[in-house]
Image: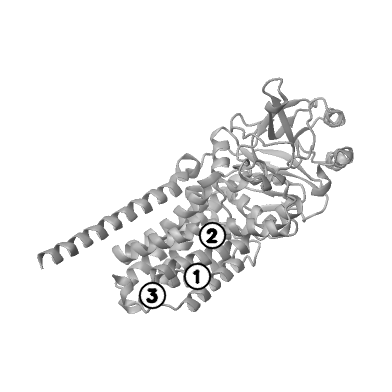
Amino acid sequence: MKEKNLALISTPYGVLASCVSVLLLLLALPGGGGFWPLLLVACVPFMVSIFRAGRRQAFFFAFFFGTVHFLVQLYWIVFVIGHYGGLPLCFAVPVLLLLCMFLAFYFVIFTLFSRFFVTHFSLFVCLWLIPCTWVAMDYLQSIVFSGFPWMDLGYGLAGVPLLMQSADLFGHYGLTFILVQVNTLFALCLLFGKQLQGRKQMAVTVCLVVISVLSYSTWRWQQLDKDLKQAKFLRIGIVQGNIDQGQKWDPARQGATVRGYLLQSRILMQLKDKPDLLLWPETALSFFPPGHPLTNPISRFLRDEQVMLLTGSPWFESVNTNIEDIQLFNSSLLFDTQGRIVNRTDKSHLVPFGEYVPLKRFLPFIAPLVEGVGNFIPGTIENPPACKNGRIGVLICFESVFPDISRKWVDAGANILVNITNDAWYGRSSAPHQTLAMTRLRAVETRRALVRSANTGFSAFIDPLGRVEEESPLFVSWESTRRAVIRNERTVFVRGGFAFAPGCLLVSFFAFVVCLRRKYRILECADDIIIDK
C-alpha cells in the first residue's frame, strides 16, 4: 500500500492545509479574487492532507474542507432567505450550514474513491482517475435532489476567454478535469517525491494534454472570430429596470414599474440602430398579463414602435373550476409587433425553497420562502420563440447554471440564447459575479450569442466566444442595444460531448468496484493463509 510510506499528518496541519485550499479557491474563483492561475495549485494542500492522513482523519478533512469552501462561496444565501424569505437569522444560518454540510459529502466520497485508487492502481492511472472522480462528484451535485451546481473549478477560467474555448467539446466539466489533473500531478509529486516512478512520464502527459487544449482553443478562437464578423444577427435591446425586490410585488408599484420599463424602452427606440427585440428581466411584469389593464400600454407601445418584446411574468392555468387546482408558472412571454402574446415558455428547472418547497408538509417553517400564492409547476423545453431570423432559447433565472438546459434549447432549434433573471435577491454579494461567470460558459459550450437581462444586474451581451461585449453596473437603471449573432452550428458538446461528465461518473464507479474486488481477494488470500497455518 503506497500510503504506508507516508508519515501521517496531524489533525491541526490537515485542517490548516484544508483552509489554505479554501483561501486559494476563494482568491481564484469569480466573486472572490478572480486570479485564475491559482486554480493550478489551489487543491494541492487539500489533496496532500487527505492522502497523508489516516482514514477517519481524511474523511474529516474532506468534510471540513467542503463545508468551509461552500460557506465561503454561498454565504449570500443567509441574506436571501433571511431578508426576503422572512426567516430569522437563527433559522437562516442553520439552513446555510446544513446545505454546505450536505454538499461537503461529495468531497468525502471523492476522498473515499481517491484513497482506494492510490492504493490499488498505479499512480499514472490515478492521474486520470482522480480528476475523473472530481468531475463525477460535480455532476452528481448537479442532479441529486434537483441539483445545485455552483462554481465548479472550470468556471474559474470564465475571465480568460481564450482558455475556455475547449468547452465546446466537453463543456465546463472538461475544463475542471484539466485543472484537477494539474493539481493531482503536483500533489502526487509532493507526496511521493523520488519514490514516484514514471514522474517524468506523468509530467509529460499532463503537459501534452494542456498544450493540446491550448492549441485547440487558439485555433477555435481564430476560426470563430473570423466567422462572427460575417454572421447574420438580431438587434436586441436590454432593459435593466433596477426594481427593488421589496417593492417588486407591491400592487401599488406595478403601474410605476411598467411605466419605467416603457420609458427606458423608448430611449432605445430613439437610437439610429433600433432593436428588433426588447428584452426585459424575469418577472418584470409582476402580474398576470391576460386581461390586466397594465398590458394595454405595453401593447400600444409595441404597435407604435413595431418592435417585439420578450419579458418575464408569472402565469397561471386552471385545471378545473376548483381554485386549489390552479397551476402557476414562472414564464417568459413573447409579444409580437401588434402587442399580442404569441409564445410562452415556462421555467423548466425550479428553485427549491424559492419556487417550490420540497417536502413542504414536513417542513412548514420553510414555507415563507415561497414568493407568491403557491408552488410553481415546471415547464418543458420545445419550440423556441421566433423573432425574424432568430429562434430563442430562454434561460430563466438560475437555469443558466445548468449546461443541459441550454444544450436542450439548441437541440430544439435555438440559434440564440437569452437569460432573463432577477438577481436582486443576492444584494451586493459575490453571487452576481458568479452567475455571470457561469452564464458565459453556456455561450461557449453551445457557440450561441447569449443576451442577459437582469433586474439589478449584471445584464450583459456575451458572444459565442464567451467574451462580454458590454456589461451593466449593479443596482442602476440601464439600457443598451447591440447586435447578437445568429449561429446554427451544433457543437461537439451539444451533439454528444455532454456525456463526458456522466462518463466520468461511470468510469469512477467501475474503478471503485475493481478496487473493492481486489481488496476482497486480498482478504480471502489472507484468510486462506491463516487457515493453512
Q: Which numbered marker is on residue 41?
A: 1
Per the model, the C-alpha gap separating discs 3 and 1 is: 14 Å
Residue 158 at x, y = what percent?
A: 60, 57
- Taking the spot 38% from the left edge, 48% from the top edge, the residue there is 506
Of the two numbered discs 3 and 1 on the same chain, state the one appearing first in sequence.
1
Where disc 2 sits, the SS reads helix
Q: Amino acid at mark 3?
A: Leu
Whether residues under marks 2 and 1 lie with C-beta atoms below 8 angstroms apart, the answer is no
The 10 Å Cα crowd at callout 1, few under 14, some 14 to 19, many 20 or more, is some
Q: Residue furthest top?
A: 321
**Residue at image x 50%, y 64%?**
63
Asked whether residue 122 is in view, the answer is: no
Residue 206, can we see it? yes
Q: Of the numbered discs in the image, which one, if any, rests on residue 191?
A: 3
Of the numbered discs in the image, which one, if any, rests on residue 164?
Answer: none
Q: Is residue 166 left or right of residue 486?
A: left
Per the image, label 1 sits on a secondary structure element best described as: loop
The percent coordinates of residue 130 (x first, y second) are 40, 61
Q: CA distance from mark 2 to mark 1?
A: 12 Å
Which quadrant holds residue 9?
bottom left
